[in-house]
Amino acid sequence: MTTKAQFLGRVRASLNQALVPDASPEHPGSFQGYVQPFDTPGEQLVDRFKQELEALSGRVYVLASPDEASQTILHIMRQRNATNIISWQAEALGLPGLRETLQAAGITISSEHLPAQGEARRSKLADIDDVKVGLTGALGGLADTGAVALVSGPGRSRLASLLPPVHIALLPRTSLYPSLPAFLAAHPETTAQGSNLVFIAGPSRTADIELTLTMGVHGPAEIHVIIVP
């Protein structure tokens, strides 16, 4: 049995070994001007967003057409041998024809509706427990942190971004903002639009008291953001 002294000794040893890595000279946080102005050109926002999210172990795909986006989603699913998906409703995804493309490829789209309680809720959770991929849209993306903003509500279930181990988010290029203040200025009523507003920057990370970092415990272990025209 581990004694209190042994436990605290392991914590002290971990703290002594913990190192904060030096910032890369190429990283925007390494120089003045970290926060970009509101009128930052779109291409710079795309590049900055991609740099930030990929620094946090996310993946970003900058695509030129809806068809490319559909094929990228299918490629991600095939790499993981996934045949079913939890998805927001079509109008919330903003990519016409996507659901039809997925269904034509043999992908089963699981209902996002979750009963409030009782046996119906338990049965539904059991049915979707093995779904590997969740698909959502995004209200916006923050270039300075690589975060995507999701607002839940009818047709935009939280399940899709929380339950499956892989989260794919569709982000319109025109919905990229330099920073959180710029996003809130463009969407002043955001907090009243749904039951939940979250900013997701990278896969779920959990660290215990001994500084052991684990990914994917309290949310997806992978996040893929597809920037669409």
Image (cartoon, rainbow, N blue to C red):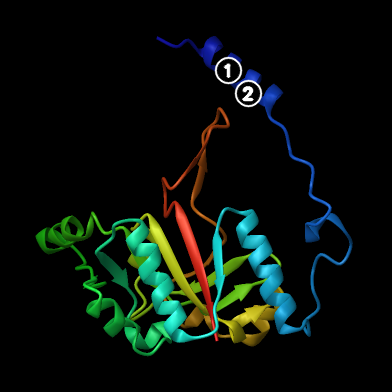
Residue drawn 44% across the image and 51% down it: 221
Q: Which mark is residue 207?
A: none
Residue drawn 30% across the image and 81% down it: 101
Kind of residue at disc 2: Ser
Residue drawn 67% across the image and 78% down it: 177
Do tag 2 and tag 1 residues touch (Cβ < 8 Å)?
A: yes
Q: Which mark is residue 14?
A: 2
Residue situated furthest left in the rendering: 119
**Marks 2 and 1, how far apart at CA:** 6 Å
Image quadrant where residue 166 sits = bottom left
Q: Which residue is mark 1?
A: 10
Q: Which percent across, then down, holds residue 107?
A: 24, 71
Kind of residue at disc 1: Arg
Please name whichever residue, 151 or 67, is drawn nearer the observer in this view of the structure: 67
Q: Quadrant of the N terminus?
A: top left
Mark 1 neighbour density, 10 Å: few (under 14) some (14–19) many (20 or more): few
Q: Quadrant of the C terminus?
A: bottom right
Q: Is residue 3 above or below residue 161?
A: above
Image quadrant where residue 71 sits = bottom left
Which type of secondary structure does the marked residue at label 1 adopt?
A: helix
Please name whichever residue, 192 or 72, is drawn nearer the observer in this view of the structure: 72
Left or right of 30: which side holds 115? left
Left or right of 105: which side holds 202? right
Which type of secondary structure does the marked residue at label 2 adopt?
A: helix
Q: Which percent across, then down, holds residue 153?
A: 37, 78
Q: Is residue 206 above or below residue 195?
A: above
